[in-house]
Image: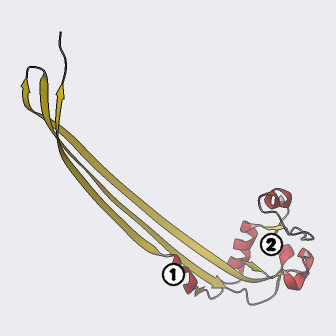
Amino acid sequence: MNIQVNPSQNNAANATLNAWETEVLKTTDRDVTASFDVRMPLATGGKTASFLKAGGKFKDKRKVRAIEATAASPGYTVPFSQLQDAGFRNDRFMSYFPASPGYAGFPGIDPEASRALYASTGRPQAEVDREGDAENYDATERIGAAYVMAVSSSSARS
């Protein structure tokens, strides 16, 4: 949803709806990890023990993000008062994002009122917003590692 704040002079009573922007996100993340370690005795004699150690680790990760953004206009002027959320706590919102001095808080948008208005306009012709395509990705990572080592230890026995 795009509310044009400048023409309203930061007064919600003067604001109008310009367009709806809808983003549908789908993200999947798969992470598979496997590892193993083995130890085999080589020789043991007296105060010395020897082992052969081997192991490995494998990681396979894939993350896919798909976003579809669409934009639509209502086709006529819609006053912001039709969409205003009276329960929106602007003072709490602005505490997370400190405003510039002199900036007057703006009321929130009621999502249900916005959806109902969108549906009542006969579903305006929505266009796919291609800017969202830059946020789509398919990333894969595969890592493998292995080791082999000989270990010899001696112990003093009494």
Identify residue for label 1.
133
Q: Is residue 72 left or right of residue 130?
A: right
Q: Are marks 2 and 1 in contact (CB under 8 Å)?
A: no
From this viewpoint, is residue 88 visible?
A: no
Disc 1, SS = helix
- Image vertical order of residue 152 relative to residue 14, above or below: above
Count how many numbered circles sit on residues in the image.
2
Q: Quadrant of the N terminus?
A: bottom right
- Image vertical order of residue 31 relative to residue 40, above or below: below
Q: Is residue 6 left or right of residue 55?
A: right
Displayed quadrant of residue 22: bottom right
What is the crowding at mark 1: few (fewer than 14 residues within 10 Å), some, or many (at least 20)?
few
What is the crowding at mark 2: few (fewer than 14 residues within 10 Å), some, or many (at least 20)?
many
Q: Is residue 14 left or right of residue 45?
A: right
- Residue sitting at 60 percent across and 82 percent down? 70
Q: Which mark is residue 28?
A: none
User: Residue 78, how many percent across, how many down?
Assistant: 81, 82
Q: Is residue 42 left or right of residue 114?
A: left
- Residue sitting at 68 percent across and 77 percent down? 119
User: Residue 99, how many percent across, how many down?
Assistant: 84, 67
- Image vertical order of residue 53 relative to residue 32, above or below: above
Q: Quadrant of the C terminus?
A: top left
Question: Mark 2 is on which residue type?
Answer: Leu
The first of marks 2 and 1 along the sequence is 2
Q: Nearer the viewer, residue 90 or 94?
A: 94
Q: CA distance from mark 2 to mark 1?
A: 29 Å
User: Residue 80, how many percent across, how many down?
Assistant: 84, 76
From this viewpoint, is residue 86 visible?
A: yes
- Residue sitting at 35 percent across and 64 percent down? 141
Identify residue for label 2.
83
